[in-house]
Image: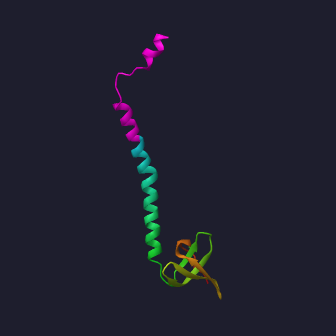
């Protein structure tokens, strides 16, 4: 029984454990939190730079051409005469294929 207690003691103290915990936090920040913040910043910048006539894709996958922009509301034309009113946050990215 005494050998179990002797094995549980550590000579290094808490410093190695704190360094390991700090390293885990740094890895978590640089590989998970920071890229997510950068992506959100880029997405916000894209939405702020939307202009009429751009071909865009919504989060739901609809392709259309921006017809009107007013504050946080956008109007896209998905087909001739078919217009949808959406929140600006519903725009995902610029379309690579032009909508006719």
93, above or below 77, in the image: above
Which quadrant of the figure has residue 16? Answer: top left
The residue under the point 54% across, 80% down is 74
Q: Residue furthest bottom?
A: 81
Q: Would you place residue 16 above or below residue 64 in this image?
A: above
Q: Is residue 98 left or right of residue 13?
A: right
- Seen from the viewer's position, the closer of residues 27 and 63 is 27
**Can see residue 17?**
yes
Q: Is residue 25 left or right of residue 82?
A: left
Among all residues in the image, which is located at the extreme top? 2
Relative to residue 71, is residue 21 depicted above or below?
A: above
Q: How many marks?
A: 0
Residue 91 seen: no
Looking at the image, which residue is at 39% across and 40% down?
A: 23
Tell me which residue sits at (46%, 58%) in the image. Answer: 36
> Residue 15 placed where, x, y %?
34, 31
| Residue situated in front as seen by the camera: 11 or 34 | 11
Residue, x 53% and y 80% (percent of image)? Answer: 73
Residue 62 position in % (x across, y down): 62, 74
Question: Is the stretch drawn in magenta largely helix, strand or loop?
Answer: helix
- Asked which colour scheme the image uses, the reply is rainbow
Range covered by the magenta-colored residues: 1-23
Quarter of the rendering occupied by the C terminus: bottom right
| Residue 57 drawn at (x, y percent) | 57, 73
Is residue 69 located in the magenta-colored stretch of the structure?
no
Tell me if residue 8 is in the magenta stretch: yes
Which one is nearer the viewer's eye here, 76 or 79? 76
Q: Position of residue 89 (x, y in %)?
A: 53, 72
């Amino acid at each position: 029984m005494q050998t179990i207690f002797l094995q549980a003691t550590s000579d290094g103290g808490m410093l190695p454990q704190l360094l390991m915990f700090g390293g885990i936090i740094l890895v978590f920040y640089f590989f998970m939190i920071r890229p997510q913040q950068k992506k959100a910043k880029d997405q916000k910048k894209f939405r702020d730079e939307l202009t009429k006539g751009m071909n865009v894709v919504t989060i739901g996958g609809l392709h259309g051409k921006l017809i009107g922009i007013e504050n946080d509301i956008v109007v896209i034309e998905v087909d001739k005469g078919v217009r949808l009113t959406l929140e600006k946050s519903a725009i995902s990215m610029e379309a690579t294929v032009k909508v006719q």
